[in-house]
Image (cartoon, rainbow, N blue to C red):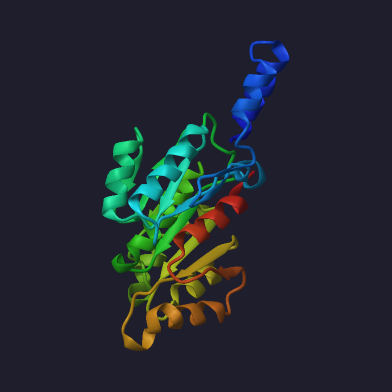
Amino acid sequence: MTPDRIRNVLEQVRDGSLSTEKAMETLRAFPFEDLGFAQLDHHRALRKGFPEVIFCESKTVEQVVAIAERIVAHGADLLATRVTAAQGEALCAAIARARYNPTARTVALRQSNQPPTARGEILVVCAGTSDLPVAEEAIETAKAMGHPVSLLADVGVAGIHRLLSAQDRLFAASVIIVVAGMEGALASVVGGMVGVPVIAVPTSVGYGAHFGGLAALLGMLNSCATGVTVVNIDNGFGAAAAACIINRA
């Protein structure tokens, strides 16, 4: 249940074009709706500025589609993460205009009339091509939440000149998300260059002693650059959600 939809219902009751009974029927799933296997938090858009997001791992195709259909029916924007190919195909078949990004493993649909007012652009800086799935998840999340976002790809510290050649883009960003695997050094480099919030995302990309992203996570947590915060391994969604809150005007 979006703020715009609630406001519209209240205005219709006020001007007499909608009965109290019909309004109650419209609002009956407020603030949550019990589907048996899930309880949808329709109140979240009012609290957080964006509706509940579907985390699709370990959910069946039928569960994902049922949740998504109820979210869309309430007029809310849709974002599903960690979507399998089968789930993505089913969601796009069930929901008109839903868009599947197989690299990001997301399905999204924007229904909002007006995007939130943003202070500037979110820049996603990606260390290597192998980190792109996490970077793309961050980009799709920011787009779904209505924020301008762009990608600076394959600028890891193994070729630092690639990053230095894009300094203008770094300095122009309002918030920067740095996605890196291996030792995660890129977050410290970017954090030492800019005066805006840097959100670091360690990825599970690397060789044996990388320990599935733990080495990058620890490297980012121990960054000596100021203004760097760190989210969980491979959590592009969490980084973008935080960046959008920071980027609100």
- Residue 101: image location, x then y, percent: 32, 49
- Residue 69: image location, x then y, percent: 43, 38
Question: Left of 25 or right of it: where is 37?
Answer: left
Work out which residue is located at the far front of the displayed protein and give it: 36
Q: Is residue 168 visible?
A: no
Question: Left of 13 or right of it: where is 112?
Answer: left
In the rendered view, tell whether residue 179 sits above or below residue 1.
below
Q: Quadrant of the C terminus?
A: top right
**Residue 153's quadrant in the figure?**
bottom left
Please tell me how many numbered marks the rendered image carries: 0
Q: Which residue occupies 34% across, 51% down?
A: 61
Q: Is residue 205 visible?
A: yes
- Residue 178: image location, x then y, percent: 46, 65
Work out which residue is located at the far bottom of the displayed protein and give it: 209
Q: Quadrant of the N terminus?
A: top right
Q: Which residue occupies 50% across, 70% down?
A: 232
Question: Left of 160 or right of it: where is 170?
Answer: right
Q: Which residue occupies 56% across, 51% down?
A: 244
In the rendered view, tell whether residue 22 sits above or below residue 114.
above
In the rendered view, tell whether residue 6 sits above or below residue 223.
above
Question: Left of 225 or right of it: where is 56?
Answer: left
Work out which residue is located at the far right of the displayed protein and give it: 14
Work out which residue is located at the far top of the displayed protein and give it: 16
In the rendered view, tell whether residue 87 sits above or below residue 111.
below
- Residue 199: image location, x then y, percent: 54, 64
